Amino acid sequence: MMSDDVERRLATSGHVVKDPALQQYLHQIICRLSPEYCADIRVHVVRNPHFNASMAPNGSMQVWTGLLLRAQDEAQLAAVLGHEIGHYTERHSIERWTQIIASSDAAAFFGLAAAAAGVGPAGTLGQLVALLSIYAYSRDQERQADDIGLAMLVKSGYDPHAAAEVWRGIIEEVGAGEEDAQRPSVFVSTHPRPEERMKTLEERAAALAATSGQERSAERFAGAINGRRAAWLQSLLGVRDFESNRIVLDRLIASAMNLGELKYFDGEFYRLRGEEGDGEKATAAYEMGVTIGGAAPKIYRALGQSYMRMGDNERARAAFESYLSAAPNAEDRELIEAEIKNL
Amino acid sequence: MWPKSILILSCLLLAACQSFTLVEAEKQTIGGTYSVEAQIQWNKMDEQGVELWTVDGPLLQSLRFVSEVKDGDALFTLPRAPGSAEQQAQMPTYRDDFSLSETVEFIIASLERYGANQIKASHIRPAKFGSADGIRFEFTFLTEEGLESDGIATAATIDAELFVVIYSGTHEYYFPKYKDQVERLLASIALVDGQVGYMFKSLLEEERVGPGVG
């Protein structure tokens, strides 16, 4: 079966995150949402900064780190997972496959399927993404998956408002940046208009509010991503989509979860963007991150570079020395020592 | 408009049709800026403006010479494919006022966007690039297919342009196979007369000597 081939390739690809604890956490949420399908679903965490999750007909679920980065609590994450389980339980991808085979899309579909299965020299995540876009579900299927996902949230005791919140975030972000083959648009393009879905989900959540649970599990979610988020943020900033990245960062900063770490990445954002006045903003963000605490030692290195750029060699030296003191075995120790010597 | 399936097939065929020329085991000049002593015969191809050498095939091991990266340039140009223009626009770009650490970060971020997954750099240090002051580090990464791979990168700024040499290959067999020869090649880098390299910008005005410096 083709989805088995895709899953085999995904499971061994360089994009998949080997993190059993994180996979277990996600699987626990899936089992809570859908105990009857729990044993059939396998979760693969994919390191990709864009927002996406998907479910193949063989029970293989992809959760991209971009989704984990954007979810603000477990309820929001569960809203997306529940939606994807809805597609699975209703066999939407199989229905779509049947439609494709009967239509003029068949040639394109099988061309991509062959590439994704490794025929040819360039079997990559990009092709798997392209495959997802061909799997685009109908509006009715999406509405059905939304209904099932919302029902799962309510049955599991999560706050049903979380589903509409996810879409509000996507709307803000998609409106800010440029289109790209792997941006949130991958998720959005396969669905009805986000505004319509958000409104419908808000209305249904309001109707259910009196009888539904209110659980958000923000702390449990924070514990699950603790120590992992920095790598995902690094990956996000690796994509120079500054408008979209700014929105994601602002939302995270508003949540104030490990603010010191976020201030480091806030500074990195300004340093990488490099517009007029961004140097000063970067320095201010690093300084605040140091004051708050909780960021990795490299915040001192970043601060040292900021001061060095400003010509403030004395403070640059102090910041670099703080970095080497906090990270005595840093891989770039010799380089930083050279920077200090050069001040 | 061409059907999508034909466009995809064209991309795959183009990628498969790369032409190689032989590199003899002798002194070779790279971009007119520096020379290296090739210890063995290599096969050379042009990879979107990057000079790529390999013995067993680019997917197994490769030696990339990236030359004349100017302020605002990306290190790599992505092959033409649907959506590649947008992804190219999101590639990191070089700034000629980068610090040493920023230059290292630029190379690592560029490698990540070019398909080196979960890259980890080690022993990042100042190093000679011929007579120029440069940087060097080793790294590990996973290929798109999840194959464990190793790499070496060294770089220097020469006349305000960045020059980078990257050797990479599979952790098992192909990277170690020619590592010693590559180490000797890197040690043989010699700037062509008149080229002056630097990585320490503040020393530039005081110590840099050579043609074109008033």
Image (cartoon, rainbow, N blue to C red):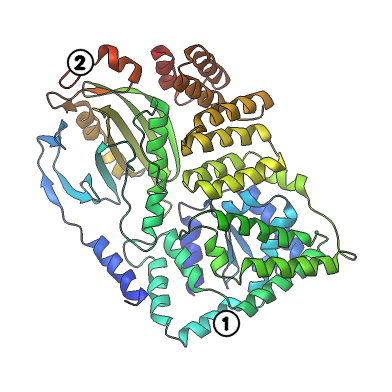
Mark 2 secondary-structure assignment: loop
Nearest the eye: A226 or B71: B71
> Which residue lies at the image location 54% right of the left edge and 73% below the top edge?
A136
The chain letter under disc 1 is A
Residue A104 position, x and y percent, is: 42, 85
The x, y position of residue B36, in whole percent, is 16, 32
The circle drawn on residue B38 is: none
Residue occupied by mark 1: A95
Q: Where is residue A301 in the image (x, y as percent from the top left)?
A: 51, 24
Instruction: Tell me if A132 is positioned left or right of B46 in this view.
Output: right
Question: Label 1 to label 2, Cα distance in Å?
Answer: 71 Å
Q: Which quarter shows the C terminus of chain A?
A: top left
In this rendering, position of residue B111 left or right of residue B63: right
Mark 1 belongs to which amino acid?
Glu
Q: How crowded is mark 1: few (under 14 residues within 10 Å), some or many (20 or more)?
A: some
Res. A39 in view: yes
Q: Name the residue under label 2.
A: B209
Q: Say which of B108 and A39 sits in front.
A: B108
**Which quarter of the figure has residue B28?**
top left
Task: Describe residue A152's horizontal placement relative to residue B114 as left or right.
Answer: right
A144 or A281, which is in the foreground? A281
- Please, which residue is most extreme toward the right here? A210
Q: In which quarter of the image is residue A88?
A: bottom right
